[in-house]
Amino acid sequence: MRRLRDSYKQNRGIHGHLLAVHHLLPAPQRPNDPLEPRRAWAGCPFAEVDFLEERSVRRKPHIVTFDEEKRILDVADPHIRALAVLILETGLRSNCEALVLKWDDIDFVSDFIRVLESKTAAGIRNVPLSARCKAELLRWRNLVGPRFSPHVFPNMRNPERPLKQIRGSWAKALKLAKVNHFWIYNLRHTFASRLSAAGLPDLFVAQMMGHSTPSILQTYAKLIDELPS
């Protein structure tokens, strides 16, 4: 024990802190020639590492066809059906906007939805409520309405809290519909692509989705010309 204690003291810094590992290693020397390959800098353990080009490997969004949409909605559980139609018709973010929605946030008289929680300041907005989305939400409200929970998508075991997890139910719907798996977030991509395909201005689409600028729409634009009319 004394030997360990003495060894510990010998390795303490001048101010009583342990020396950092890089202080104990010889400093790497860069090659004089800036054009020399990185492998010449042998002192750096990451000299041969190529950084990941995220944009080149990022998973491309899946734009849902109208046939896929119908097959999914025909077999989905009621809460998944209501959630899917909500996102397809409004472009709400699935987790931070749609799942936390409350019945008081929906104005069925003036036909709009107040988005009071979002990941960005631009996400706080009013979204028009289409006739299709209104009908679907009213049908869902007849099953699980404000008397049961203030949340549009409540946790069935604790109605005072919103639903947090829908991955299992979503995967089940895709399997029953015989549609290859994709994340429910892609319904938001589909919403943006359909608006763009209809010829609406990029700025309007961006505002509907809760973005401050339309530049982000390049992420959602995919195979618009292939969407059925």
Image (cartoon, rainbow, N blue to C red):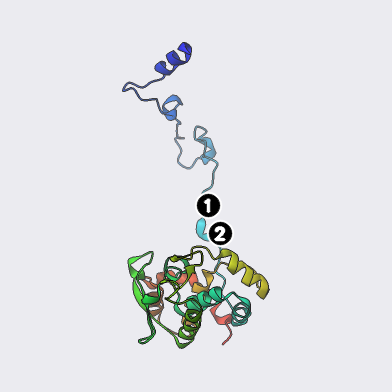
Residue at the front extreme?
147
What x and y, as percent, mark residue 225?
Answer: 56, 81
**Does residue 24 appear in this view?**
yes
Which kind of residue does numbered mark 2 sit on? Val
Query: Which residue is nearer to you in this view: 159 or 114?
Result: 159
Asked if the residues shown at circle 2 and circle 1 are in contact, with their CB atoms under 8 angstroms apart, the answer is yes
Query: Which residue is nearer to you in this view: 77 or 122?
Result: 77
Q: Is residue 49 above or below residue 87?
A: above
> At 47% across and 79% down in the image, what residue appears?
141
What x and y, as percent, mark residue 191?
Answer: 49, 77
Tag 1 residue: 52
Checking the image for residue 57, the label placed there is 2
Q: Is residue 225 above or below residue 123?
A: below
Which image quadrant: the C terminus?
A: bottom right
What x and y, as percent, mark residue 3?
Answer: 47, 12
Q: Residues within 10 Å of mark 2 (few under 14, many from 20)?
A: few
Q: Which quadrant of the structure image shows residue 102?
A: bottom left
In the image, taking residue 196 as reference, residue 78 lies left or right, namely right
